[in-house]
Amino acid sequence: MSEYVFPPPPQAAAPVAGGGLFPVRRIFCVGQNYAAHVREMGGDPSREPPIFFTKPADSIVVNGADAPYPSLTKNLHHEIELVVAVGAGGAGIPADKALDHVFGYAAGLDLTRRDIQAEARKTGKPWDMSKGFDFSAPLGLIHPAARIGHPKTGRIALKVNGAIRQDGELADLIWSVPETVAALSTYVALAPGDLIFTGTPSGVGPLERGDVLLGEIAGVGEVRTKIV
Ligand code: MN
């Protein structure tokens, strides 16, 4: 029998409200899924197919833990997002069956090195290092759909040091949760443990060391972190 040449990494995981840990397999994110945010980023909010990017599973920051200000950026941005936790896998999932694959929901933050992203967008290069860095995905408790249902409307907001920075509405998602799950499952076979960050409303902006972030999604929950 072959042995690992060094101990395998610990399983990335996120606490579930009411108990237990959700083992994180992969993190997918939707780019530009609220019209007002598409406009603030200089885009055209026409209903083009959703675009996806990824973060490493171990970029999760457990709720309430600190997030270090990352290297190689002078413009770290906050993006508050509804996060879908996949509980049952599948490929080619039809939208009208997609919610059967959802374990639950959380509030999350898609922290972004905006200056690196802007340069990548300008030059047509990959976004990876603007999005997929260490500690780039603070995540609130995962709330099972069995307890909270499947939120389709509700306020999604972010306070930084107590002041409102982002204030949106889930109903304004360009691609709904079922449509997003269906589209993503045409690119990859989804698996239990996958997380999907569904995009951010408008109001993104810079963060500094010492900033205290509180994201809240009505009917879902909250995410807290401090930039250190
Ligand atoms: Mn985002």
Image: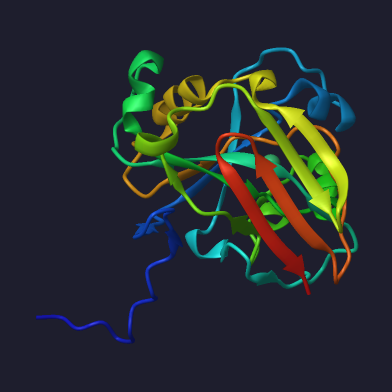
Residue 132 placement (x, y as % from top left): 63, 57
Q: Quadrant of the C terminus?
A: bottom right
What residue is at 15 percent from the left and 81 percent from the top?
Answer: 2
Decide if residue 61 is on the left or right side of residue 76. left
Towards the viewer: 4 or 108: 108
| Residue projecting furthest to the bottom | 6
Decide if residue 70 is on the left or right side of residue 75. left
What residue is at 77 percent from the left and 17 percent from the top?
Answer: 45
Towards the viewer: 43 or 123: 43
Residue 149 placement (x, y as % from top left): 43, 29
Decide if residue 19 is on the left or right side of residue 34. left
Q: Is residue 129 above or below residue 126?
A: below
Q: Is residue 127 above or below residue 69?
A: above
The image shows a total of numbered marks equal to: 0
Q: Is residue 9 above or below residue 206?
A: below
What residue is at 72 percent from the left and 54 percent from the top?
Answer: 111
Q: Quadrant of ligand 1?
A: top right
What residue is at 77 percent from the left and 21 percent from the top?
Answer: 35
Q: How is the image coloured?
A: rainbow
Q: Quadrant of the N terminus?
A: bottom left
| Quadrant of the rendered image containing residue 125 | top right
Residue 180 placement (x, y as % from top left): 51, 26
| Quadrant of the rendered image containing residue 79 | top right
Decide if residue 201 is on the left or right side of residue 84. right
Residue 41 placement (x, y as % from top left): 86, 33
